[in-house]
């Protein structure tokens, strides 16, 4: 069910939002709705984005390498 909402905002903010909406083929209403949804999504579920899910497990790191020593060696060589 859609409900009407009236907002009072700075004119410059509205003008910039209209430009953004037009560039992205959105109405201001849809843009505000998406923003409110993003604010109110349940953050505790720790949902990964689809991309993160697809990439998970692709890289496997060698557990025997001490990354701190590798980084230090790299930095010392870089800044000789």
Image: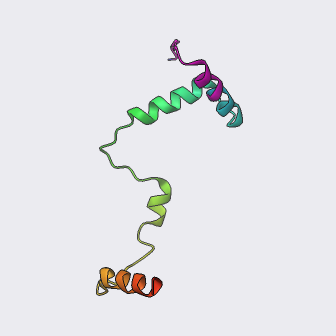
Horizontally, residue 53 falls left or right of residue 42, namely right
Q: How is the image coloured?
A: rainbow
Q: Is residue 7 magenta?
A: yes
x then y, percent, for residue 50: 48, 55
Specify start and end residues of the magenta stretch as a single range.
Answer: 2-16
Q: Residue at x 65, y 33 (%)?
A: 20
Residue 57 at x, y percent in the picture: 41, 71
Q: Provide residue 24's location: percent of width, then percent of height.
A: 67, 37
Residue 8 screen position, x and y as percent: 52, 13
- Residue at position x 47%, y 66% in the image: 55
Q: Is residue 25 above or below residue 9?
A: below
Q: To which quarter of the image does residue 59 belong?
A: bottom left
Residue 53 sits in which quadrant? bottom left
Residue with the most extreme front position: 80
Residue 69: quarter of image: bottom left
Up-down relation of residue 7 to residue 73 (above or below): above
């Amino acid at each position: 069910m859609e409900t009407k909402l009236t907002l009072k905002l700075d004119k410059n903010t509205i003008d910039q939002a209209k430009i953004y909406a037009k560039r992205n083929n959105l109405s201001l209403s849809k843009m505000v709705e998406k923003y409110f949804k993003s604010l109110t999504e349940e953050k505790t579920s720790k949902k990964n984005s689809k991309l993160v899910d697809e990439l998970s497990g692709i890289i496997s790191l060698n557990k025997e390498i001490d990354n701190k020593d590798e980084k230090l060696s790299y930095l010392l060589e870089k800044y000789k």
